[in-house]
Amino acid sequence: MRQQIDKEQWGGEARFNALLETIRSRRKEFEDLRHIPMDIIEEFKAIGVYRAMVPAIFGGDEKPPAEFLRMVEAISAADGSAGWVASFGMSPAYLAALPGETLQKVWQESPDVVFAGGIFPPQPAVRTDRGFKVKGRWKFASGCMGASLCGVGIQPEEAGALPRMAVLPREQVEIDPTWDMVGMVATGSHDLVVDEAEVPEEWTFVRGGKPTMDTPFFRYPSLSFAAQVLSVTTLGMAREALDIMRASVAGRKSITGAPNLGEREYAQIALAKAEARVRAARTFFYDSTDDAWSTIEKGHQPSRDQINLLRLSTTHLTQECAAAIQDTYRISGMSGADNTHPLSRILRDSQLCTQHAFMGEITWKNAGAIFFGHDPLPGYL
């Protein structure tokens, strides 16, 4: 497989490996809590998850996109929910649309700021002398239990106004623990509730809007990156599922006297096909990432076709990895169907990923439209 994560860039190999083992050993605790606990969030801070994409002038590390994606991939192999929550360390890609003076306030004390957002549905917002009056409820605020800063989607009540995100301190936001889904149980993707808060205009931004910072990372397509960081969780989980299956059959005999699972032709074929799917999808995904980043490093903007391949390879990665996980689960027999078996949890988590709009069926349509020279639907590029 292509280059793996450089753990020395994430707190050192020993510390990173210890974190992965801790996450693996506490997966049931995370699911019981329905969120990732603060001690793990603090360790994410310590290894650099939240400062990875922050500009150096604010104490950040300015890592390349692929390096961040490999980190999320590695954590997701230990636990899908933990990887999903860590993925929101990409938030500077969104926050960079805030005015420069506001960004100085965001990171003035530390670059390790944990941001969580509930975007939908955008709630009507009345303009005030200072900004907007914000009130409402928003769904799917992944990682909000560990956040110090929250964003909510608003629709200014003005003709032609674009939807915006209003950024508030965690203290002004109520978290309603509504998250109850078939997978990614521990992401804490609860509802955010705000009651009549006034948010200054300089603390609002258009999601995917033009960054006010000019460093290479902020020239990388932000909506594409937002999709990539979620999609790559399925890659980590697929790698884990394949490794679990290979390890689990060693020396295991069937109670019926049938051949060991690893000796059965159908299992060998299924595992080989799943391995090929995951490796091929991973290569397409990271090649598209590296190609766009190389263009940026040369001082240019990624082309429409390059951005399309970012989005296409992202959807392809999720769908192929989820399919590989499902095929691996099918050959596991009744042992894999046990709710306590890691394959059962990985299957549930991966299926939840396929439901996300970023990786949904409509993205295939948008990619195909561009291949035929047509415009995609709004919000794709």
Image: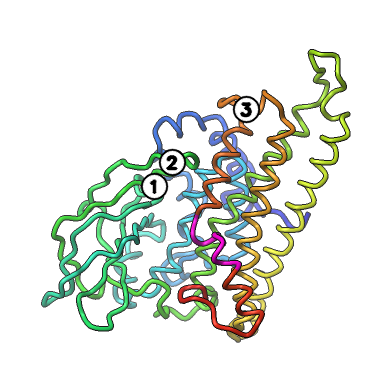
Residue 314 position (above or below residue 13): below
Position of 75 with respect to 138 (left or right) is: right
Residue at image position (54%, 82%) is: 375
Residue 339 drawn above or below residue 330: above
Q: Residues within 10 Å of mark 3 (few under 14, many from 20)?
A: some
231 sits left or right of 117 in the view: right
The residue range painted magenta reads 356-364
Circle 2 — which element? Answer: loop
Identify the image quadrant of residue 327: top right
- Give left or right: position of 171 versus 110: left
Badge 2, how many Cα within 10 Å: few under 14, some, many 20+? Answer: few
Classified by dominant secondary structure, the portion drawn in magenta counts as helix
Q: Position of residue 234 (x, y in %)?
A: 61, 49
Determine the residue positioned at 32% across, 42% down: 178
Q: Are marks 2 and 3 in contact (CB under 8 Å)?
A: no
Q: Do callouts 3 and 1 mark residues in contact (Cβ within 8 Å)?
A: no
Question: In the image, what residue occupies the spot 55% across and 29% down?
Answer: 25
Asked whether 361 falls inside the magenta stretch, the response is yes
Contact, mark 2 vs mark 1 (Cβ under 8 Å): yes
Q: Which residue is mark 3?
A: 337
Three-letter code for the amino acid on which mark 1 is drawn: Ser
Question: Which mark is nearer the camera, 2 or 1?
Answer: 2
Near-viewer residue (361 or 335): 361
Q: On the rendered image, what quadrant is the N terminus found in?
A: bottom right
